[in-house]
Image: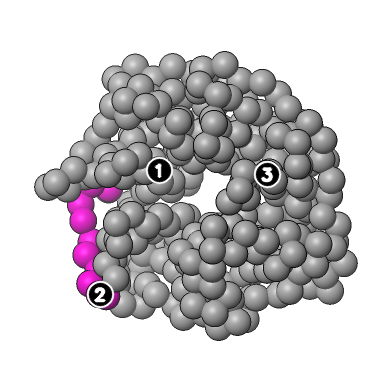
């Protein structure tokens, strides 16, 4: 097994998830990694790359704008890429050709996205798919909110009422169930975004409300937040079970970093961190953590913030 760590300084390969000397295998500004079943694809500032072994990467597409998010349909037939400025593109031939799903450009909310971030472009920060609804596509716009398609991206509906519009990550738990990690709170929907319920109000850590990503493994939801106000800087890592129990667990470096990415391999959960001592440390050394029986432990270090993780 190879754990791939995407950073603004490239992709690093961590062998067996605990190699003490990660190798840089791709030189690029990496926003998102996505396992494909037969390898991995990387969304970067210079387009899309793919690998079958984690070592050798091939540039497969250069799209208008930076590629900042990516997902693969449950059947593996469609690759989706979200860009900055906000657009979604699809490929049905393993990245050889691409088509923009341009209905997203016709949404009346686009003017509000521009008002929310004057002088900056909104971007498609996250894309979520689920085997229970193979034609359903959910995207999170930063800033902008959540939008849902039931026909593979040909048409879109707003699902933003009740969720913070600074959407960082969408986790598909089921055909209608999603968890949204946002710049102000963690939210959940059980009806495909028609209604949202804020989750972190039960975490009892008021100042930890800046969420970047979540994952679920064996009935446990893993998530983390960065501290604001008197709690800043630093992070908090939470584990929430299906029965509603929420536990905050310590982890190495929590006083100066927070967890921004997750990956799973068999029964092991990995977490990637980023330094927050002086803003977000995109180029500061970062820890890779691994969940073990008695808590979280350092598995490796990489030279830059671990924005995204994947395994092959």
What residue is shown with label 3?
77
Visible residue check, residue 133? yes
Q: Which residue extends farthest left?
A: 294
**Residue at the image position 82 percent from the left and 55 percent from the top:** 101
What residue is shown with label 2?
243
Quadrant of the frame with the C terminus: top left
**Residue at the image position 54 percent from the left and 31 percent from the top:** 38
Q: Quadrant of residue 270?
A: top left
**Residue at the image position 47 percent from the left and 55 percent from the top:** 212
**Residue at the image position 22 percent from the left and 72 percent from the top:** 245
Q: Give the extent of the magenta segment.
A: 243-255
What residue is shown with label 1?
263
Q: Nearer the viewer, mark 3 or mark 2?
A: 3
Which mark sits nearer the N-terminus, 1 or 3? 3
User: In terms of secondary structure, where does tag 1 sit?
Assistant: strand
User: In terms of secondary structure, where does tag 2 sit?
Assistant: loop
Say few, some or many: other residues with alpha carbon within 10 Å of mark 3 (under 14 / 14 to 19 / 20 or more).
Answer: few
Q: Do tag 1 and tag 2 residues touch (Cβ < 8 Å)?
A: no
Residue 111 higher or lower than 15, as above or below: below
């Amino acid at each position: 097994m190879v754990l791939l760590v995407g950073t603004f300084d490239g992709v690093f390969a961590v062998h067996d998830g605990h190699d003490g000397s990660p190798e840089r295998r791709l030189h690029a500004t990496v926003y998102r990694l996505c396992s494909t079943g037969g390898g991995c694809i990387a969304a970067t500032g210079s387009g899309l790359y793919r690998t079958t072994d984690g070592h050798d990467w091939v540039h497969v597409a250069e799209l208008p704008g930076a590629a900042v998010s990516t997902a693969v349909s449950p059947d593996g037939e469609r690759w989706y890429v979200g860009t900055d400025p906000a657009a979604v593109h699809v490929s049905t031939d393993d990245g050889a050709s691409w088509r923009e799903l341009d209905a997203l450009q016709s949404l009346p909310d686009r003017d509000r996205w521009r008002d929310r971030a004057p002088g900056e472009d909104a971007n498609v920060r996250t894309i979520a798919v689920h085997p229970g609804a193979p034609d359903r596509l959910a995207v999170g716009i930063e800033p902008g909110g959540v939008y849902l398609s039931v026909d593979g991206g040909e048409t879109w509906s707003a699902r933003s009422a009740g969720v913070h519009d600074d959407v960082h990550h969408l986790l598909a738990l089921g055909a209608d169930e999603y968890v949204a990690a946002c710049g102000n709170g963690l939210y959940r929907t059980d009806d495909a975004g028609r209604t949202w319920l804020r989750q972190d109000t039960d975490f009892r850590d008021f100042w930890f409300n800046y969420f970047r990503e979540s994952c679920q493994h064996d009935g446990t939801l893993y998530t983390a937040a960065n501290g604001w106000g008197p709690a800043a800087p630093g992070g908090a890592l939470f584990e929430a079970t299906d029965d509603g129990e929420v536990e905050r667990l310590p982890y190495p470096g929590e006083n100066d970093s927070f967890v921004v990415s997750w990956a799973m391999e068999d029964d092991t959960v990995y977490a990637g961190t980023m330094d927050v001592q002086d803003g977000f440390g995109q180029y500061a050394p970062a820890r890779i953590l691994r969940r073990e029986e008695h808590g979280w432990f350092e598995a490796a270090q990489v030279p830059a913030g671990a924005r995204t993780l994947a395994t092959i």
